[in-house]
Amino acid sequence: MNIELEELAKEFGTERALHPVSLFIPSGALISLLGPSGSGKTTLLRILAGLEFPTSGRVRFDGADATGLSVQDRRAGFVFQHYALFRHMTVFENVAYGLRARPRRERPTEAEIGRRVTRLLDLIQLPDIGARYPNQLSGGQRQRVALARALAIEPRMLLLDEPFGALDARVRKELRQGLREIHDNTGLTTVFVTHDQEEAMELADLVVVMSMGRIEQVGKPAEIRARPATEFVRTFTAV
Amino acid sequence: MSDIVLSRPVPVTTEPPLARALLVGLAILFVAIFLFAPLATVFAEALAQGWRGMIAALSLPDAQAAIRMTLSIAVIAVPLNAVFGIAAAWAIAKFDFRGKAFLITLIDLPFSVSPVVAGLMLVLLFGANSSLGVWLMAHDIRIVFAFPGILLATLFVTFPFVARELIPVMIEQGRTEEEAALTLGASGWRTFFTVTLPNIRWALLYGVLLCNARAMGEFGAVAVVSGKIRGETATMPTMVEMFFNEYLSVAAFTLASVLAMLALLTLLLKSLLEWRHADLLAATCRH
Ligand SMILES: Nc1ncnc2c1ncn2[C@@H]1O[C@H](COP(=O)(O)OP(=O)(O)O)[C@@H](O)[C@H]1O
Ligand SMILES: [Mg+2]
């Protein structure tokens, strides 16, 4: 599914989190929103998910207007910065949550839910942790469970807010590879937020550099390296 | 291999044994004097004429009416305030809106107003001297010196307990788990019942127990608004006072011990639940 942002702006009271921004995300792309803290990355991602509504501008999914579409109807797989796993549920129940939340007619049977959860836990290479609670997992494991939970709803797109932010360097490398593989296997349009330019350059097909609520440049990693459009992009992406 | 002798692990927070013994002793002494002794006295006085005296006291119509009144009030007031408390805490913890600080102050109001004043407020508002009271009387609706007045007084006095327990817990937990549920397709109600409510259940239980204890034990506000009519509007606490003033000490202390037993029962219930769900409690308290 492709995503189109048209002159999207967001104000919190008097504070402008996003100046009108426009962006086209091709179907199946893995793109990164890169920028320093406070540049509006999370706000943009939350608008895509339907967790926040823009002050003005439009969002289109495959050309159809989705600006007013409710968060439930967007079917965006969202991975939160601190994972936001349900702390009182086991890993199995966390992953099954989205399937159980479906209206009765579309809800899979218990056996089918079990099969799907098992398959997802295999996919994130944590087949044996279904019975554990989130506080019994390491940071990297929590992140992967959050990803499996988001994938369980058969999302139309995958949105990740600083998915590797709180992890140590080795785990981060591993999970980056994991995300790349999952993206390539599912073909989902994927947007991830990061403030780490190395991570963005290494993982993304397309990098969107943001600063102070504005998009500074959109391009392939090599393009941005070779021809930074603004002084900000030059300094921020300098190694 | 090295021959370092592994010594007993020393706790980081350690005090000299004497200081420790002193502190523990002091705590026990305090509990004994201020908690256990009065409670024991109540039961001892109730049993001054043996079980017969106690049973006789409990079969007094006034005592039975008071027990019925108190239980009926608690049965209605506690669930209502649990719902109000959850709603208020939810609004405060999970949403930003104008007048939020004012709402928080308002929730604390019943704690800062003396219960007697609260009772008087209701009497002035609904009593025969106000135009509202006159109107109510004309339509044969009795609030003051009747069940609705006692209920209102109890609701007012016990309102803060549930909300005060829930607000810090809900603020600490933030709203990302709820947001996660929404992105997974859950409706607002489903999110509330499957994510919000389970996350606050222990704080809620605690708030409900405190609320219940106060609802059954409230004296001041209820004394003013009920008029303490024996057999009609007297509650257990007000009936205890009336028995006591009439030198019916066995009856007074018997009713008092029933009240104390109800309180102990709720505490027991809470401990039981905590014990039954210890593993879940450990898993969910800290992330
Ligand atoms: N709920 C909110 N209320 C008020 N201001 C907000 C809110 N969310 C974000 N902001 C503001 O919007 C700007 C962009 O924030 P954000 O999108 O979180 O940036 P980033 O994710 O790039 O760090 C910041 O200045 C932030 O203070
Ligand atoms: Mg952010």
Image (tube, grey):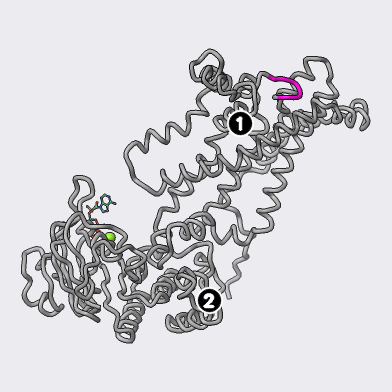
Q: Are marks 2 and 1 in contact (CB under 8 Å)?
A: no
Q: Residue furthest front?
A: B139
List the residue tagged with mark 1.
B151
Q: Mark 1 belongs to which subunit?
A: B
Q: Which residue is at a point 51% across and 83% down the rendered structure image?
A: A115
Q: Considering the numbered disc 1 on the image, is that residue within a helix, a strand or a loop?
A: helix
Q: Residue at x 71, y 31 (%)?
A: B69
Q: Amino acid at mark 2?
A: Ile
Left or right position of B186 against B237: left
Above or below, B229 relative to B182: above
Q: Residue at x 41, y 35 (%)?
A: B103
Ligand number 1: quarter of image: bottom left
The residue stretch that appears in magenta: B228-232
Residue A86: in sight, yes or no? yes
Q: Can you say whether A228 is above or below A114 in the image?
A: above
Q: Which residue is mark 2?
A: A129
Q: Is residue A14 magenta?
A: no
Left or right: residue B1 versus residue A226 is right
A231 horizontally vs A182: left or right = left
| The quarter of the displayed image where residue B222 is located | top right
Percent x, y for residue A29? 23, 80
| Residue at mark 2: chain | A
Q: Residues within 10 Å of mark 1 (few under 14, many from 20)?
A: many
Camera-side residue of B10 and A114: A114
Vertically, is A235 above or below B53? below
Residue B172's disc is: none
> Residue A159's spot in the image, x, y percent?
30, 70
Q: Secondary structure at mark 2?
A: loop
